[in-house]
Image: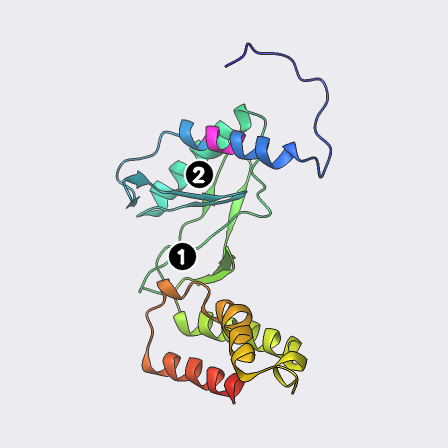
Amino acid sequence: MSDRFPVRNGLKQGDVLSPLLFNFALEYAIRRVQVNQDGLKLNGTHQFLAYANDVNILGGSIYTLKENAEALVAVTRKIGLEVSADKTKYTVMSRDPNAGRNHSVRTENSTFERVEEFKYLGITLTNQNSIPEEIKSRLRLGNACYHSAQNLLSSRLLSKNLKIKIYRTIILPIVLYGCETWLLTVRGERKLRMFENMVLR
């Protein structure tokens, strides 16, 4: 590693180094956070899921969540990053609809908004972990894709096999994105089959 050197100019928006340096800084911050040991553990690590600038802090309780959010805000502030309170949301996933209603997540200067659902990496997460809502959302997106590719799929110039390949490579991945996490019911499976039948007829 080199010696420290002063940086006098920031990077311009769209500079190819910007995302790389941001990822380094965020990774450094997350590794420096002292994470409470009584929280959730995934694959041997505690409570943080990060993809680009989307960070999820998981906690077994509101108290654990608050503690880890405060720690992350403090560490990121030290390295010059700022957590946007306007873009930061939290939800409580529980079978009890009143769980966590009396609590709020606050850091030094801001309060985070509690929401019933939010999108993370293209998947809609709800406080009741409602898979039917996610299936409806995926079917809407798949339907939009189907209608945009309808000229290809109804063309007499393309073979049936090629149309099936178009369906499997363009439309189906949109509908099934994130399906590994679904707890599929008979009703959900029926809706997916109806969509597939509509496209393939």
C-alpha span from label 1 to label 2 = 18 Å
| Residue 116 visible, this angle | no
Which residue position is annotated with label 1?
101
Residue 121, image x, y percentages: 50, 55
- Front-most of 9 and 200? 200
- The residue closer to the viewer here, 77 or 113, is 77
* Magenta stretch bounds: 25-29
Viewer-side residue, 174 vs 75: 174
- The structure residue drawn at horizontal position 48% and vertical position 61%, both measured from the top left corner, is 123
Sort mark 1 into few (<14), some (14-19) or many (20+) by Cα contacts within 10 Å. Answer: few
Residue pushed farthest bottom?
Answer: 201
Q: Is residue 173 left or right of residue 99?
A: right
Q: In the rendered view, would you say 182 is above or below 50?
A: below
Secondary structure of the residue carrying tag 2 is: helix
Image quadrant where residue 46 sits: top left
Kindly identify which numbered label has been placed on residue 132: none
The type of residue carrying mark 1 is Arg
Of the numbered discs in the image, which one, if any, rests on residue 69?
2
With respect to residue 168, does 201 lie above or below? below
Image x and y of residue 42, in percent: 30, 45
Q: Amino acid at mark 2?
A: Ala
